[in-house]
Structures are given as structure tokens and as C-alpha cells.
Image (cartoon, helix red, strand yellow):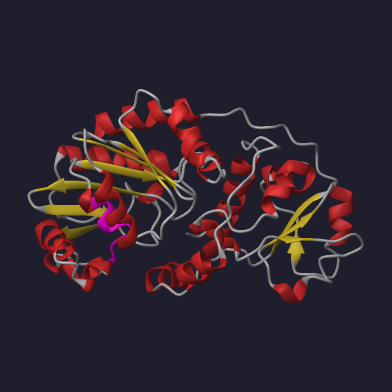
Amino acid sequence: MSTIPKSPEFEALNELSARLGANPAWVQGAGGNTSIKEQGILWIKASGLWLVHAQQQEIMVPVALDALLDALERDDPLAEKAQHFVREDLNPLGLRPSIETTVHAVMPQKVVVHVHCVETIALAVAAEAGSLVRERLAGFRHAFIPYIRPGLPLARAIAACLGDGIDVLVLGNHGLVVAADSVAGAELLLEQVTAALAARPRLAPPADLEALECLALDSSYQLPEDPALHALGTDPASCRIAAAGSLYPDHLIFLGIAILIARPGETARDLEQAASPLLVFPGKGVLVTRHASAGSLAMARCLADVASRIPPATAVRALTDSEQAELLGWDAEKYRKSLNAGMQEGSP
């Protein structure tokens, strides 16, 4: 860990970050980010690093808050790349700040927690997400923000809706943000909101492991270590949802533009050229590539968890072609994608 002095609240945030990162219901892989504002500095999780490691290694980046907010106010294009505002004297590892740094900056509270909570995403990808959120979060000081690209566009949308003590944001096709003036307050609010959004997951039929092993023969695919992934194939509603398209940014970045659903008679070897990290065999289960990164496997689990919480009759809203192209062409996401590609399974 860094020798830079940290306050008790800073250390409390590291402890909370690690616990959030260890729980796939809240955070998957390198997703999610936390921050704290202290003495004019916004300390925020570094892009591509994992919250679960917050107490094992330095994952927080110091950003000059006033300078970044001034750039946002002036509509300076440099605000899109928050690395221009990093306090390099306090960043000996040369870490790059989260792509959501501007989102954390515009929130006035001291502590901001952004998670890709599966309970939230299951609502946030629904075609009627706004009304569902309003119903579930009545009584909370919240706002629903329809999907807009993360980073600067999202920060501007948040800044436009802040008021009346808003401290909960549900981001369409994305996730959840809670904010408070203490770490304990943010954690309590997070627990209360996720409880209000919670839905009972469907139980999926068991996977046909024998059939899947046959389908994997002579290919680079294998059974996943996590049996929960099989629900994407064995539960018809989850399979339909997986086939609907990319539902949120990390789905796109870590699993690709479309989940590959095998047609009757197709084997993993037949689908090898697609180089998909995940193959879904309806009625049987899934196979994953032997070269899948830890990040991709975490996102596959996230998709299975999200899909199982969406009622079968619910219409979902996938990211549009233009929204996907915008994400894939964005430098910040190219950076995260390159970090994920360099990770071997199990070694984030």
C-alpha cells in the first residue's frame, strides 16, 4: 500500500470498497467505483482496477477537484479525460482515474459509491425502467436517468437533475449511485436502496453437463467453474434476455456485442471462429472459452444474475447500435478493454 497518509474515513472507504468488490451482487470484476473528497482532492478508484483489492494495493487516484469542476463549468473538453487533473505528486504509481470521475465530482456529497448492483440493473434495463424505479424508491430522494454514455455526458445529465438533496441515482442500462457525507451513511443508504429494489431470482433447471462436454469436444471451450452461468441456457426467459443484445456498458465491453446462442445441431467447434467468450446452448447450459479473462467471467455471472431477476414478460431495452458504437469508440473504454484482454483467468 502507498505511504501517503490517509484519514480514518479514507481507510473506512477502502474497507467498504473491498467488501463491495467481493460481492458479485454489487460489483463484478473491475466494475463499479467509489470516491471520497478530502482537502480539495477527489480520491477515486483507478480505471481497470478491482474494488476487492482496495485493502491490498493502492487503487485510488487523487484528482484536483476544483480544477476539474472548473473545467466542467467551462465545458472544457479536457474534462472528458480526468487524467489531466490528477495530482501526480500523490500518484506515484501513475494510475489512471475511473471513467466515471466526472460523475463523482459533480455529486456534492463527500462519499460517492457507484455499483453495478444486479438488483438495480434488472430494473434499469427494463423498457419501463423509469416507472418501475419510481414505484420501488418512493420515499427516497432519488432520480432516474435514462441511458446516456458514461463519463462526461452522464455527469452533465446528473448535474442537471441534482436538487432537493438527491442522494440516490438509478442509471438506465447501467447501475446505481448513492452518496452521503460519511462512509457509514453511504453504506447504510446503499443497503436500504438495494433492499427496496430486490427481486427474487428464478430457479433455473439444472445443466446437461454430459451434453455440454460432448458439445465442447475438439474446441477451445469448456464447462464454466461457476455453475450459475448455466442458467443463461437452461432458463428460457434468461436465454431470451441474453439474446436481446448488450444491456449495459460492461456487458458490451467484456462479453461483446452479442451473446452467441447456438442453433440446434451446432457445436462449440462450429462456433469457434466467432471468438466469443461465452456460448449459450438453449436447454443445456453454457460453455466458456479456455482463454476467458477473469473480467469476462465475472460479467457472464452478472448477466446470469441480472436475467434471473427480470420477470419473463418484461420487455427489455438493449443498447442501440449507435450507443454501442459510441462506447466501443471511446478511448476510456478502449483502455479498459485492453486491460481486460491482458488479464488471464483468475488473475485480475
Picture residue at 78% right of the left edge, 43% below the top: 236
Picture residue at 36% right of the left edge, 45% below the top: 114
The part of the chain drawn in magenta is 95-104
Quick one: 255 or 258, which is closer to the camera? Answer: 258
Quick one: 199 or 231, which is closer to the camera? Answer: 199
Assign the N terminus to one quadrant of the image: bottom left
Whether residue 261 is visible here, answered yes or no, is yes
Q: Name the side, left or right, on which 337 lies relative to 237.
A: left
What number of labels is visible? 0
Q: Name the side, left or right, on which 1 lies relative to 173.
A: left
Quick one: 238 or 46, which is closer to the camera? Answer: 238
Residue furthest to the top: 139
Picture residue at 44% right of the left edge, 56% below the top: 30
Measuring from the top left, give residue 47's x and y in whole percent. Answer: 35, 62
* The quadrant where residue 3 appears: bottom left
* The quadrant where residue 167 appears: top left
Q: Main secondary structure of the magenta part?
A: loop
- Relative to 155, residue 21 above or below: above
Residue 57 on the magenta segment = no
Q: Name the side, left or right, on which 180 lies relative to 132.
A: left
Measuring from the top left, give residue 131's x and y in whole percent. Answer: 48, 35
Residue furthest to the right: 265
Residue 102 on the magenta segment = yes
